[in-house]
Amino acid sequence: MRALLAIAGCAAACLPDRIDITGKLCSDERPCGEGWACVPQGAERVCVPARGQGGGGGGNGTPGVVMNLLPNGDFTEVEDGSFDEWKAWGGYQLAIETQTVRSAPRAARIVRAGNDAGGGLEPDKELASGPPRGQRYCAAAWVFGVPSAREVWLQFRERDGSGQTVEQSDGARVAVADGWAQVRHEWGSLGNAQLEVRLVVGTGIANAPLYVDDFAAWAAPQGACP
Ligand SMILES: [Ca+2]
């Protein structure tokens, strides 16, 4: 009886915390188990928590983000005075914003430099290298700006082994408005060498800054974006 009591007493107090298997290699034959999802990461598939925000950050307020594949997507971390894992492209320049933020303490601020060239914001690296054909990827970002003729949208691109863009998909356009608005897009991989995602700002009349925060992209574990 004493032994049984000891076991019963231990059951509540001695259970180990749930083991963190984030990053463990997995496959259809070797699933991660209940509460975990098996998602592409580079050329392999790894376990991530099935709900909530995983590593990488930036899933704030974006339902269904399993694991943000974009580094520093909430623009929290500053390295040597810049967001070194992000860059503005085209006719835009990237700066750190601390006032107009969706998630504290920082957001990205992009400003058109000079002429009315298009451009936008993108991570410094590809979203996925060797993504499995048929894998669906989801992306979402929040934007805020002075109302203008400008529109913003998300764009997926696939590149072949030589770096040539072979596929491109543009998401729904959202008008820049005085308030945080979300842009979303999703894409089923065609299995090319590289998959990229970026924010595109259409040409317009305003040179006013555009604020971007909580930029997330993730592999849909069930084959559909939320
Ligand atoms: Ca932020």
Image: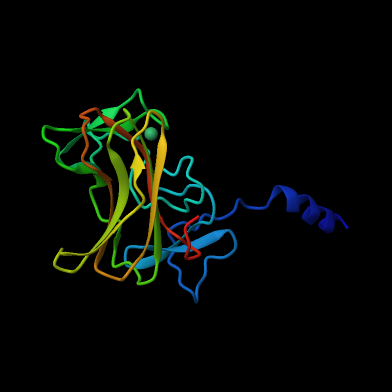
The residue drawn where x is 40% and y is 66% is: 45
| Residue 183 appearing in the image | yes
Location of residue 205 with respect to 184 vertically, above or below: above
* Quadrant in the picture for residue 121: top left
Please state which of residues 12 and 53 is positioned toward the viewer in this rendering: 53
The residue drawn where x is 49% and y is 40% is: 61
Say how the picture is coloured: rainbow
In this figure, what is the number of numbered marks?
0
Q: Pick out the residue farthest to the bottom.
A: 29
The residue drawn where x is 27% and y is 37% is: 150
Q: Pick out the residue farthest to the left.
A: 115
The residue drawn where x is 24% and y is 68% is: 193
| Residue 56 appearing in the image | no
* Quadrant in the picture for residue 207: top left
Location of residue 165 with respect to 64 vertically, above or below: below
Point out the image quarter for the N terminus.
Answer: bottom right
Counting from the top left corner in percent of width and height, residue 181 is at 41, 37
Location of residue 157 with respect to 112 vertically, above or below: below
Counting from the top left corner in percent of width and height, residue 19 is at 55, 55
Counting from the top left corner in percent of width and height, residue 27 is at 46, 72
Quadrant of the rendered image holding ligand 1: top left
Q: Pick out the residue farthest to the top.
A: 99
Counting from the top left corner in percent of width and height, residue 190 is at 31, 70
In the drawing, does residue 149 fall left or right of residue 50? left
